[in-house]
Amino acid sequence: MVLLITHSMALQKALETYIKKNYPTIEIDTVHNDIDGTKKIASDNTYKLILSDWDLDFVNGYELLVNVRNSQKYKDLPFVIITDKRDKESILSCIKASVTAYVMQPIDTEVIDQKIAPLLVKVAPKGTDTQQKQAAAKPIDIPPCPAIIIELYKELKKPTPSFATIIGNIKKDIYVTATLIKLANSPIYGMGKVDTVERALQVLGLKNFNNKILASALHKSIKDSGAATDGFWKHSVATATTCSYIAGKKSPGHVDAAYLVGLFHDCAIPLFLKRHASYEEIVNLSLAGFIEAAAYENKQYQTNHAEMSAFIVKTWGMPHMIYEAIRHHHCRDFKPQVDSSSNPEAKKLWAILVLAEHICHYYGYSSVVPLMPDADFAKVFEKALIELNMDVIDLKDMKEDADTVLKTISDSF
Ligand SMILES: [Fe+2]
Ligand SMILES: [Fe+2]
């Protein structure tokens, strides 16, 4: 049984028509204000899903949601809010109250297909309707590892790798060539005019050079496969730059790994955006590193962008420590699933990443959601600061110094 709470005849008609047509075995109980909704919830034990409006006069869907989550009986019940409210505060308050899906009006068949149908599939008796299968959550396509990376690693595995071969392969890829030269010319390296791949190799250094090849090739692949926005790239490059800066201060052996962790920690976001139209509603919260965003994604898509980003870098052959650091970047603590000798390094990279995100957020490289004060960050990510041997005063100093570094990123990509 589905409980529908709305004062809007148009919304009632759209949802009832859709459900009756596509899921004829689902029963619908409809009420037209939140008082009746509250009574129904209190008196009936058969609801498997609540679809609630949130309007100004008749249905306060947010309050209903909070009450439901506070009740023992229905605290885990799927609860969808359908509303005209598009402001971040409303979205965030519902996410914090563990809304299952937040659907913005106007809705049509396509929106119901994407956002509500996956929940209807679960509510309907199994095996009754082939359309249920069509509405199931769609998987994300992982882009293949770029050819240049395969060639690079093939060469590097040889007892005596030939850099002439590596450079030859790089020159076949105009995008990677251009990116390497641009990076070698950036103020971070400060060596003057660089106009060839060979000279870029000298300026960037051998180890750095390989990481930059990897980074630029992955960058292009994600760009081609997903719906990457300018905001996404700005956030990714700023986080990478800040990660390598923090690593330089706190863990000098991990400067390159930290750069990669920062660059690709959110690399699944463009893929989520391309695959799920509904993702646009929370993309800023995800970019800002909100813990609640990953929980929301888990409910909505049965996975989250931290898991998927980690999976992508693992699929492409990046080290375990980078995988684990990225996988944990929306977590308050670092708890790897398997024992590995690289877990201590992964934990360090995780701590660097969450701190870098906080700093980037402060300087406007994340999104438009409200800032988290340093004191709150220090409480939420206490374990990350301990890992870096820092307190809130050190954090403030690090934040101020990072300002200069972040001013250099415009030339990075
Ligand atoms: Fe992020
Ligand atoms: Fe993220």
Image (cartoon, rainbow, N blue to C red):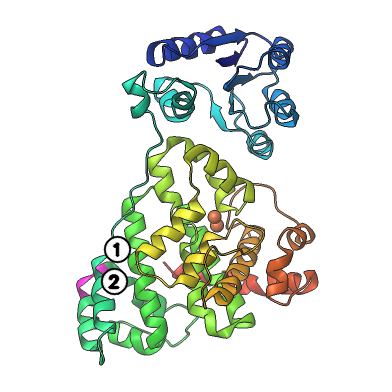
Asked if the magenta segment contains residue 171, the reply would be yes
Question: Which label is found at residue 149?
Answer: 2
Q: Residues within 10 Å of mark 1 (few under 14, many from 20)?
A: some
Which residue bears the numbered disc 1?
Answer: 145
Provide residue 281's location: percent of width, then percent of height.
Answer: 53, 38
Work out whether residue 142 or residue 106 is closer to the camera in this orientation and state it.
142
Residue type marked 1: Cys
Asked if the magenta segment contains residue 102, the reply would be no
Work out whether residue 279 or residue 380 is closer to the camera in this orientation and state it.
380
Question: At numbered mark 2, what does the secondary structure look like: helix, strand or loop?
Answer: helix
> Does ligand 1 reach within 8 Å of label 2's beta carbon?
no
Provide residue 325's location: percent of width, then percent of height.
Answer: 54, 66
Q: Is residue 145 among the parts visible in the rendering?
A: yes
Ligand 2 found in image quarter: bottom right
Q: Which of the 4 image quarters holds residue 17? A: top left
Range of magenta residues: 170-174
Provide residue 24's location: percent of width, then percent of height.
Answer: 41, 11
Provide residue 400's location: percent of width, then percent of height.
Answer: 70, 71
Residue type marked 2: Ile
Q: Tell me the residue at 33%/48% (across/down).
A: 141
Query: Is mark 2 in CB contact (under 8 Å) with mark 1?
Result: yes
